[in-house]
């Protein structure tokens, strides 16, 4: 699936080259030239991944990465550092700030796209087009289809995104607020009970194949997707 990528790069030619190739790969690219602009954009909406140049005017990319990791709202955003520094100690320093990967300039656009895909698969699996299957329930983001036991499961777009997120994060308990942030977006202001409505619709759609039992209510906490039948329905 396309990812929203924030590109923080102050060299216009490099910024253009990266943006063009990522757009061709199907991603949506937001561009800024400095850390301060990146912070403003992140306050408006969380990207799926940040491509961050080490050397920036004003605040450095390393300092921005450090601040993102210290903030609870942004600490889970995947970060890939872009830099001309190739020495081992520089790579270690970048990774120790919390970067998920480190790419030394010059690099091929093909390598960058592959690295982004790998990081997203690890950190934001719902942002990839990889099909996921659990207990006979299969969801394919590329074709936007869900099936179970040979039967097609018809879902609305919100229920599809909700199921995709839950299936790519199995056995974890997610609060209503977390689900709103991850599925609806952290700057979409809707009631938390909206989650309950869509959970009910999702369970109803899965009921004919018996897979509604996989979506469990954890009293006082939220919901989880589990193959274990010990939750409260």
Image: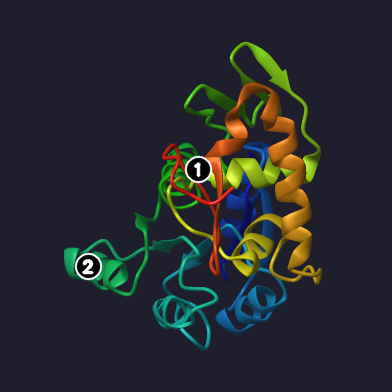
Q: How far apart are marks 1 and 2 (CA)?
A: 30 Å
Colouring: rainbow
Closer to the N terminus: mark 1 or mark 2?
A: 2
The picture quadrant where one finds residue 172 is: bottom left
Give the x, y percent position of residue 220: 55, 69
Question: Considering depth in this image, is 52 or 174 the residue closer to the camera?
Answer: 174
> Judging from the image, what secondary structure is the residue with disc 2 in?
helix
Q: Residues within 10 Å of mark 2 (few under 14, many from 20)?
A: few
Query: Residue 156 bears which disc, if any?
Result: none
* 40 over 141 or under it: above or below: below
* 108 over 62 or under it: above or below: above
Query: Residue 168 bears which disc, if any?
Result: 1
Residue lying furthest top: 150
Which quarter of the image is occupied by the N terminus? top right
> Judging from the image, what secondary structure is the residue with disc 1 in?
loop
**Residue named by callout 2:** 92
Give the x, y percent position of residue 194: 79, 61
The picture quadrant where one finds residue 104 is: bottom left
| Rendered residue at 25%/73% (across/down) | 93
Q: How crowded is mark 1: few (under 14 residues within 10 Å), some or many (20 or more)?
A: many
Tag in front: 1 or 2: 1
Question: Considering depth in this image, is 154 or 119 the residue closer to the camera?
Answer: 154
Give the x, y percent position of residue 96: 27, 72
Give the x, y percent position of residue 182: 63, 59
């Amino acid at each position: 699936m396309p990812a929203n990528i924030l590109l923080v790069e102050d060299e216009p030619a490099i910024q253009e080259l990266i943006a063009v190739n990522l757009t061709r790969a199907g991603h949506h690219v937001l561009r800024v030239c400095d850390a301060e602009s990146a912070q403003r954009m992140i306050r408006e909406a969380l990207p799926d991944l940040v491509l961050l140049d080490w050397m920036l005017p004003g605040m450095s990319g390393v300092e921005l990465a450090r601040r993102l990791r210290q903030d609870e709202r942004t600490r889970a955003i995947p970060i890939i550092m872009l830099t001309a520094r190739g020495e081992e100690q520089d790579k270690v320093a970048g990774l120790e700030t919390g970067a998920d990967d480190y790419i030394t300039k010059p690099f091929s656009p093909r390598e960058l796209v592959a690295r982004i895909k790998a990081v997203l698969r690890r950190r934001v699996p719902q942002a990839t087009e990889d099909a996921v299957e659990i207990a006979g329930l299969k969801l394919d983001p590329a074709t936007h289809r869900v099936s179970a036991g040979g039967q097609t499961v018809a879902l609305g777009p919100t229920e599809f995104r909700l199921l995709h997120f839950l299936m790519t994060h199995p056995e974890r308990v997610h609060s209503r607020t977390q689900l709103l942030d991850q599925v609806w977006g952290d700057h979409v202001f809707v009631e938390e009970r909206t989650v309950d409505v869509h959970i009910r619709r999702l369970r109803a759609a899965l009921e004919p194949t018996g897979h509604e039992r996989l979506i469990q209510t954890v009293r006082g906490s939220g919901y989880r997707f589990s193959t274990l039948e010990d939750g409260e329905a």
